[in-house]
């Protein structure tokens, strides 16, 4: 028999999870309807019933480092069927938001990202950096000349990359630091709760598991098992592929610019440009659909963390597309202004990625990989 | 009364289609009575015909062959007339195939014929009952117990004009409700605790001139019967000659070898045993008269025995207390630990003693769950960072109290889990509670400053008879152990009823209740007491045969003083004198007829229900023999309880379930009233089998009269022995159980028994 676990409820944790959108968590009376109706919960130690009681008992250490909270795709089946209105889907979502801020340092920034009052400051940071750095280096020209609209004449590509390249390194570093702890924690938790058949983490095997899980992620296999929120899967897929497409485009043009020394704007006939346009449109449509779904969804709550991410995705896509359209429409002033705003969104994407809900991209992938690696029937 | 007979056959509802009505009329004619038929007897026209015959022709004894007596009973009730209902609809045409005249034996027609004859003979044998009137009738209500239940019952009864006396053994009114910090909510939204309401209630009592309060008082004896109870009161601890005597305990009724002592010796011992006390039959001249009693004596906190719950630290660790002790601490002010007076910021509430059993503590119920939730809230009220843990096997929060449970759940500092507490141990100055099989999925430990055990509320009737009835069967409720000592008879079917007519239980003496529930309970018991008083005044039964005017009549000249009636009466209605002659107390009686079934001399009967009336019905049944047919059909008698079995058979008919037409059913008031002579008569006249059909007996009995089917089973066993001596198979006589909702079992029970008897072959006594 295992040693007894000393329970020390953290009432602060309960309150924070409630503030992050899990306000109904204490309504749970442990009937386990949620675990039964969840289409993607494992048979062995299924979620979210056990997470619900751990949350209402304030057992932070059982939740933050628990891979299961990431296996949940917030289908909402549980929340719809919950006889008490405890909204397990939203509670897990809130716990995930809490976990993201736990693993991302500095914590103060994580708190700020989840605090609507801090939004002006967070948006102000890129503006200040752009202008200050642009004026110091002279790479920002508010009066670009030439008949053709060339965005780099206004906001030099050098300036863009001078900011964005270090920023992506920053994001990657924060993730790396967070993931190291995260992986150790979810492994320890899985060992304790008997959810793994592995004693240690073998990097090679873990890598193989990662390769095996990629198709599942891309095809949204798990997401598609949801019943309540099925439409969201398509929208989510559009957004994901939009981002992937734009990432590919950006990488290609980065190479084109720095290695082949060819400056944009590039021809609309260029296949890469096609990919860029299709991805941009997918991102816009996908995020609009997701916003629409959230508005019409009655069984679950949407709060700041959800809206800010959707706002970011839509903002990115919309400003990007509009920048291009105004350029083609030869509206120079509007196009430059939109480009500036677009760059603010890009900055936010990179700078706040490890702290925002978007970090699920990394944590969920790792958690799913771990689950695959741990041979957990899922 | 001079009987003028009338027989009426309704041909509606399929009766006329299935039966040869002319044939039935011929049967009536053979009995030298006249039959009238009507296609719609319960309709305006049909009833007008009956009324016309009653007023113009002077008909006063009606045999109505139509539907079951359980329907249209109000339509076919005529003042001053004897009415028998022959059930041609539910139990003949609806449950049997259409009578076929072309067959040699028309089973359905024979069945109808027999029932008609039985109905006609019954009305010949019965009389119209006359009400029993008391000499010293009192309308006053005695309420035993001055807690929230007693006070509420007194107020409810006083408000509708009854004089009430409350006796309270303590110096003040209020009971436990006056000792709490806060009480559970009684109004919407049922979410927060409220200050106890008892003070207002006590004040309200003072405003009623018709409520007399006697504190520091207990009941020494209640003698007599409902409507004229003579009550002697006394100070607690006082000894009076009118203290109630106790019956001789069973071990004193036998000699050293275990043989029962003779009557005189037992009387002598009884007197010795009750020295200084007057016998039950002597009335206190200074006693006060009451019509009915509300028993609201409440409860006392369960006190664990030394060493009980040692694994939970009770007795060895000062900071482990019961919920009652915790309430006392909370009522005094902030919750402080008994051991060192330190603030108890973390408190664990344990709802089940565990040790491999998921049972809650003894004498608990939903109220215990609610109290744990309430007391958890005290911890949160007193300390901002206070934590309250509740380990339960069951959380019971019925009705609107579910809202209270929900509101408690919302408190961030209250933690609930199902689980078995294994141990409570000391750790430094605090405690460690260890629990297994929790919803948290593993063995867990919790640090606590205090531990509270959710122990129960022991009804006062466990320690003491309380009511101290001067009844021959004893001062308290008989066989109360099957109710765990609660004053009850069958709380699901008959709330407030006890096993003693005129004594109505309310509040925690009946089961653990909240204040809200106790107040509601009090209203119920007060209404029952009023019903009892008013029914008694009209000379009719209170319950469950409400309004029944008949009562048992004894032909004392032939009484052999065997005491069986006194002993078997489930309600202690009979007292006997020194010689053993029963003294009936008609208003205590519930008219079940158990005494009639018990009496070996068959000297007990009711005006409209007696050994002869049922026996004559048995005799009226045609038993065809080989003289009549080559292969005569079987004839089987079914004596069925009219409370459960008879309705179940009716419902079977309503659902057109078919069963054998060889069976003749006679409803009886209760299987307790079954007199074995009926069985003997049936068999001796050649019937092939007899079964009795009644309710479930045992600890979870369903009998309206508590013991009826149990007594019947004892009598049927004895009859088996007699059958063997007659060279008849014991299997020809059987008893079956059925509940009112088990109508689907009717065909199987009946047909299987018919098959069993058919396989045995005809009764060898047939034709003699």
Image (cartoon, rainbow, N blue to C red):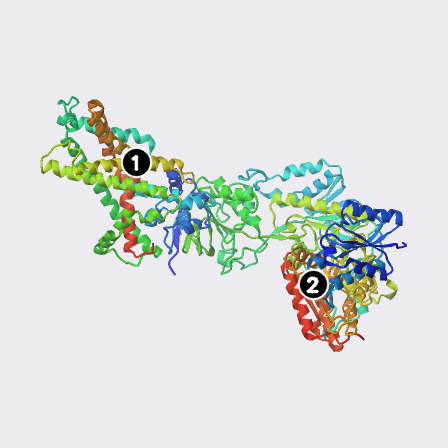
Q: What element does badge 2 sit on?
A: strand
Front residue of B89 and B751: B89
Outermost residue, front direction? B102
Q: Is residue B422 left or right of residue B104?
A: left
Q: Residues within 10 Å of mark 1 (few under 14, many from 20)?
A: some
Kindly indicate the quadrant of the structure image that contains residue A109.
Answer: top left
Rendered location of residue B332, percent (x, y): 55, 42
- Residues at marks 2 and 1, CA–CA distance in whole angstroms: 75 Å
Q: Residue at x 40, y 41 (%)?
A: A22
Q: Above or below — where is A99 with respect to B598? A: above
Front residue of A112 and B289: A112
Chain ID for label 2? B
Residue B693's tag is 2
The tally of labels here is 2
Q: Is residue B247 left or right of residue A317?
A: right
**Can you see residue A307?**
yes
Q: Is residue B374 left or right of residue B164?
A: left
Residue A358's tag is none
Rendered location of residue B227, percent (x, y): 79, 49
């Amino acid at each position: 028999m295992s040693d007894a676990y000393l329970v020390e409820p953290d009432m602060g944790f309960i309150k924070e999870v409630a503030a992050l959108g899990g306000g109904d968590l204490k309504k749970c009376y442990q009937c386990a309807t949620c675990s039964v109706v969840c289409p993607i919960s494992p048979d062995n130690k299924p979620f979210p019933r056990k997470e619900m009681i751990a949350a209402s008992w304030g057992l932070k250490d059982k939740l933050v480092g628990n891979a299961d909270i990431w296996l949940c795709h917030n289908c909402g089946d549980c929340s719809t069927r919950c006889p008490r209105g405890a909204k397990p889907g939203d509670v897990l979502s809130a716990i995930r938001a809490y976990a993201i801020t736990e693993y991302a340092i500095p914590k103060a920034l994580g708190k700020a990202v989840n605090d609507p009052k801090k939004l002006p400051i967070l948006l102000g940071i890129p503006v200040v950096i752009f202008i200050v750095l642009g004026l110091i280096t002279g790479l920002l020209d508010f009066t670009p000349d030439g008949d053709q609209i060339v965005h780099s004449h206004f906001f030099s590509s050098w300036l863009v990359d001078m900011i964005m390249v270090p920023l992506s390194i920053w994001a990657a570093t924060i993730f790396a630091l967070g993931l190291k702890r995260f992986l150790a924690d979810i492994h320890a938790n899985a060992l304790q709760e008997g959810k793994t058949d592995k004693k240690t983490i073998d990097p090679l095997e873990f890598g193989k598991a990662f390769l095996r899980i990629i198709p599942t992620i891309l095809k949204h296999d798990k997401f598609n098992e949801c019943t309540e929120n099925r439409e969201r899967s398509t929208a989510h897929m559009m957004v994901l592929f939009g981002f992937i497409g734009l990432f590919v485009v950006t990488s290609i043009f980065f190479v084109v610019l720095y290695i082949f020394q060819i400056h944009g704007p590039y021809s609309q006939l260029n296949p890469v440009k096609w990919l860029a346009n299709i991805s941009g449109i997918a991102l816009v449509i996908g995020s609009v659909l997701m916003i629409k779904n959230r508005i019409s969804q009655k069984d679950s709550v949407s709060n700041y963390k959800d809206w800010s991410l959707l706002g970011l995705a839509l903002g990115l896509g919309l400003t990007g597309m509009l920048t291009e359209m105004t350029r083609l429409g030869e509206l120079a002033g509007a196009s430059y202004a939109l480009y500036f705003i677009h760059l603010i969104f890009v900055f936010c994407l990179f700078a706040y990625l490890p702290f925002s809900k978007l970090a699920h991209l990394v944590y969920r992938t790792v958690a799913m990989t771990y689950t695959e690696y741990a041979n957990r029937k899922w | 009364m001079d009987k003028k007979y009338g027989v009426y056959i309704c041909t509606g509802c399929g009766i006329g289609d299935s039966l040869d009505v002319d044939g039935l009329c011929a049967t009536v004619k053979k009995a030298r009575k006249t039959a009238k038929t009507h296609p719609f007897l319960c309709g305006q026209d049909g009833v007008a015909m009956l009324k016309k015959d009653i007023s113009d022709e002077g008909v006063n004894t009606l045999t109505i062959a139509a539907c079951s007596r359980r329907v249209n009973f109000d339509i076919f009730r005529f003042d001053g007339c004897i009415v028998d209902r022959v059930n041609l609809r539910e139990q003949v045409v609806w449950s049997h195939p259409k009578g076929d005249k072309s067959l040699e034996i028309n089973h359905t027609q024979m069945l109808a014929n027999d029932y008609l004859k039985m109905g006609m003979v019954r009305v010949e044998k019965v009389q119209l009952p006359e009400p029993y009137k008391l000499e010293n009738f009192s309308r006053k209500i005695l309420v035993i117990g001055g807690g929230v239940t007693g006070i509420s019952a007194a107020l409810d009864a006083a408000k509708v004009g009854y004089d009430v006396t409350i006796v309270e053994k303590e110096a003040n009114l209020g009971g436990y409700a006056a000792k709490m910090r806060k009480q559970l909510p009684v109004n919407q939204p049922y979410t927060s605790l409220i200050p106890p309401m008892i003070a207002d209630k006590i004040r309200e009592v003072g405003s009623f001139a018709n409520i007399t309060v006697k504190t520091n008082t207990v009941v020494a004896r209640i003698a007599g019967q409902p409507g004229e109870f003579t009550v002697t009161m006394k100070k607690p601890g006082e000894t009076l000659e009118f203290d109630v005597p106790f019956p001789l305990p069973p071990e004193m009724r036998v000699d050293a070898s275990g043989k029962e002592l003779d009557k005189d010796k037992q009387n002598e011992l009884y007197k010795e045993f009750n020295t200084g006390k007057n016998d039950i039959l002597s009335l206190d001249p200074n006693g006060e008269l009451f019509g009915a009693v509300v028993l609201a004596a409440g409860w006392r906190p369960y006190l664990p025995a030394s060493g009980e719950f040692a694994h939970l630290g009770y007795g060895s660790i000062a900071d482990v207390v019961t919920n009652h002790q915790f309430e006392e601490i909370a009522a005094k002010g902030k919750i402080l630990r008994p051991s060192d007076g330190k603030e108890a910021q973390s408190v664990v509430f344990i709802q089940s003693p565990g040790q491999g059993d998921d049972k809650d503590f003894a004498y608990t119920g939903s109220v215990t769950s609610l109290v744990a939730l309430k007391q958890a809230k005290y911890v949160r009220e007193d300390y901002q960072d206070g934590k309250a843990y509740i380990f339960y096997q069951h959380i019971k929060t019925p009705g609107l109290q579910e809202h209270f449970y929900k509101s408690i759940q919302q408190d961030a500092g209250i933690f609930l889990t199902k689980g078995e507490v294994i141990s409570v141990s000391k750790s430094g100055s605090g405690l460690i509670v260890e629990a297994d099989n929790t919803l948290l999925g593993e063995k867990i430990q919790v640090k606590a400053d205090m531990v509270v055990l959710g122990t129960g509320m022991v009804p006062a009737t466990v320690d003491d008879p309380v009511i101290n009835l001067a009844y021959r069967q004893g001062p308290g409720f008989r066989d109360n152990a099957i109710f765990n000592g609660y004053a009850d008879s069958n709380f699901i079917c008959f709330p407030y009823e006890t096993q003693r007519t005129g004594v109505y239980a309310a509040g925690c003496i009946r089961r653990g209740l909240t204040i809200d529930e106790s107040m509601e309970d009090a209203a119920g018991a007060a209404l029952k007491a009023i019903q009892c008083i008013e029914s008694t005044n009209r000379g009719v039964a209170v319950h469950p045969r409400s309004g029944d005017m008949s009562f048992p009549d004894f032909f004392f000249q032939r009484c052999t003083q065997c005491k069986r009636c006194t002993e078997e009466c489930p309600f202690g209605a009979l007292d006997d004198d020194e010689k053993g002659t029963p003294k009936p107390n008609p208003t205590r009686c519930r008219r079940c007829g158990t005494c009639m079934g018990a009496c070996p001399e068959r000297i007990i009967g009711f005006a409209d229900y007696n050994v002869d009336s049922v026996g004559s019905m048995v005799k009226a049944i045609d038993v065809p023999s080989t003289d009549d047919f080559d292969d005569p059909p079987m004839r089987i008698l079914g004596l069925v309880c009219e409370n459960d079995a008879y309705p179940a058979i009716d419902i079977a008919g309503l659902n057109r379930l078919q069963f054998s037409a060889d069976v003749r059913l006679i409803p009886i008031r209760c299987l307790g009233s079954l007199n074995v002579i009926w069985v003997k008569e049936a068999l001796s006249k050649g019937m092939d089998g007899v079964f009795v059909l009644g309710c479930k007996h045992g600890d979870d009995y369903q009998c309206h009269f508590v013991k009826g089917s149990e007594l019947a089973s004892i009598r049927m066993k004895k009859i088996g022995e007699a059958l063997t001596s007659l060279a008849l198979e014991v299997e020809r006589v059987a008893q079956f159980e059925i509940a009112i909702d088990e109508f689907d079992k009717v065909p199987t029970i009946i047909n299987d028994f018919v098959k069993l008897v058919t396989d045995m072959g005809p009764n060898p006594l047939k034709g003699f």
